Each structure stands twice: as structure tokens, then as C-alpha cells.
Amino acid sequence: MTVTVEYYGEEALNVSLPRKVTCAVAETEPVVKGQTAANNCKPAILDTGVRITVPPFVGEGEAIVVNTETFEYVERA
């Protein structure tokens, strides 16, 4: 992951993140049988502390790709 920081003297003015990053799911609800077919999402907390919603089939410890502009689940990593 490449993070770009723009400085003016010693003061940071801008930080640019990549469009997508890979994170691990630190905490989420367990899968309920039959729920995976629905288009429902469930809350999850990533290893970075960010809270997002993920599809029901995503479990704790899984690596996922997250859009840094919208903080939305993109896909499994």
C-alpha cells in the first residue's frame, strides 16, 4: 500500500490513500444458516477499528478489500 503525504516545510498538507486496501475482519456476527442467500449486510469491525457493513458470508479473521473513498466492502481478498 502506498500512502503519499504532501508537505509544506514540516507541515503535512495532504494525505493520499490508495483507492482500495486489504483489511482483516476483527469482529462480526456469526453466519445464520439461510441468511447467505439474502442481500442483507451485517456490521463488522476491521483490524483498523473502522466499522463497515459486510455480506453475511464474511466471517471473523477473513481478509477483505475495502474502498477507502466510501468505506464499503468490495470483495474477499
Image (cartoon, helix red, strand yellow):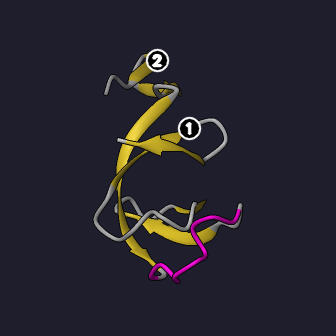
Q: Quadrant where the C terminus lies?
A: top left
41 sits to left or right of 26: right
Can you tell which mark lies on residue 1?
Answer: none
Per the image, the residue denoted by label 1 is 67
Up/down of 33 relative to 7, above or below: below
Name the spot of residue 24 as percent of width and height, x first. 33, 57
1 sits to left or right of 12: left
Q: Is 34 covered by the magenta stretch? A: yes
Q: Which stretch did the figure color magenta?
A: 30-38
Per the image, the residue denoted by label 2 is 6
Name the spot of residue 15 as percent of width and height, x first. 50, 28
Up/down of 28 relative to 3, above or below: below
Q: Are marks 1 and 2 in contact (CB under 8 Å)?
A: no
Q: The residue tagged with tag 1: helix, strand or loop?
A: strand
Can residue 19 be seen here? The reply is yes
- Residue at 46% from the left image edge and 25% from the top image edge: 18
Between 40 and 46, the residue placed more toward the observer is 40
Q: Is 14 covered by the magenta stretch? A: no
